[in-house]
Amino acid sequence: MIVLGLETSCDETGLALYDSEFGLRGQVLYSQIKLHAEYGGVVPELASRDHVRKMIPLLNELLVQSNLKKSDIDAIAYTRGPGLMGALMTGALFGRSLAFALNKPAIGVHHMEGHMLAPLLSETPPSFPFVALLVSGGHTQLMAAYGIGQYEMLGESIDDAAGEAFDKVAKMIHLPYPGGPNISKLAEQGDPTAFAFPRPMLHQGLDFSFSGLKTAVSVQLKKPESEGRDADIAASFQEALVDTLVKKSVKALKQTGLKSLVIAGGVSANSRLRERLQAELSKIRAAVYYAEPALCTDNGAMIAFAGYQRLKAGEQDGLSVTTTPRWPMTELSNPSLQVES
Ligand code: KG4
Ligand code: ZN
């Protein structure tokens, strides 16, 4: 089965073709970073308009790259949520309409389920059950995953998401959006022990809080001693955030008794996070799994793949188009429990 995946939940237009027999056949990605740069963040209306402009040219490019025709597509998966309403609508309407025109099934996919399953596309894929640390621009969650749609929330951020904290701190030290990769690069030249930033809620269950850390960085930046020490600030901030993610992940593994940790979402591309998890998990004989960097941040491949998993289990959407900007992952259906009619 060849599934076209469409990702348009935020500021990336991502399309990919996943072939259940041969794996990923091709993928294209257009990032709107430049479009939103002058505003310091994503402008929803501009994002929607740009997705509309890019979708058809990108689909044509993808078909040429993959050496496939529209008629080779067996099903279409698009991001149904969570995300920006207008941006989601563009991909959902395009995907649902194209599927109707081609007389093929369509399915709306949960963006975070897409992220979580992306490591299954890697050379050493994890297998269920596992603990998932989902760390993106909008989410920070620890989830126990027992199978497709069998998710139990273990903990989540009560304020800023990890990626959001990276982006906000980057802005404070005048690094461009998206902040994560830029902070990470600058941190390589800094001392992670230079400033002792707080690790909020470290000993309180599995929930996270990053807004205090962000404030601590902002206060530190105003002190004269911080002058010319952006790299030390970046490294110390990254260390505090990574430390929190690592310690809570280890706690979640111990609490559930599971031995595999899957990290997914934009922040899972962070090399310090990967390095620290590798070291700490080996001490408790657990393993960490992640996707290749291009599949950590938003992309169409993860949507095609997650859509395929659900289509294979017999799910598909009707002709109406639904987008769900707020959509807890724990509300997803468990396809193995669905009674066939
Ligand atoms: O998953 P994603 O592409 O989009 C959302 O679903 O939000 O995640 C984007 C987030 C941004 O906040 C970005 O700063 C962060 O992921 N990010 C990183 C890195 N690469 C992307 N954060 C830390 N280190 C990175 N290397
Ligand atoms: Zn994402």
Image (cartoon, rainbow, N blue to C red):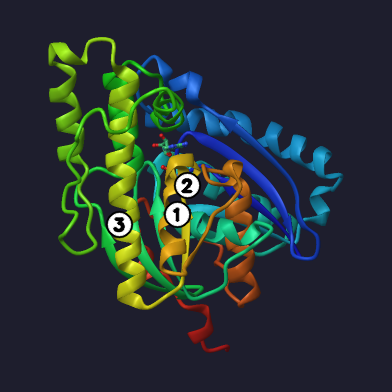
Quadrant in the picture for residue 236: top left
- In the image, the residue with mark 1 has its CB under 8 Å from the nearest atom of ligand 1: no
Q: Residue at x 56, y 33 (%)?
A: 52
Q: Residue at x 17, y 47 (%)?
A: 200
Residue wearing tag 2: 275
Please name the amino acid that badge 3 sits on.
Lys
Indicate the position of residue 188 as horizontal and vertical percent values: 44, 27
For the residue pair 201 and 287, the one nearer the viewer reads as: 287
Please name the amino acid that badge 1 sits on.
Ala
Badge 3 density bin: few <14, some 14–19, many ≥20, Cα 10 Å: some
For the residue pair 253 and 101, the one nearer the viewer reads as: 253
Q: Quadrant of the N terminus?
A: bottom right
Instruction: Give the mark toward the camera: 3 or 1.
Output: 1
Indicate the position of residue 201 as horizontal and vertical percent values: 16, 53
Please name the amino acid that badge 2 sits on.
Glu
Compare marks 3 and 2 and give the one earlier in the sequence. Answer: 3
Q: Does the image show residue 138?
A: yes
Disc assigned to residue 279: 1
* Labelled pair 2, 1 in contact (Cβ < 8 Å): yes
Compare marks 3 and 1 and give the one earlier in the sequence. Answer: 3
Indicate the position of residue 308 as horizontal and vertical percent values: 64, 65
Residue wearing tag 3: 247
Q: Does the image show residue 106?
A: no
Disc assigned to residue 106: none
Q: Is residue 200 left or right of residue 285?
A: left
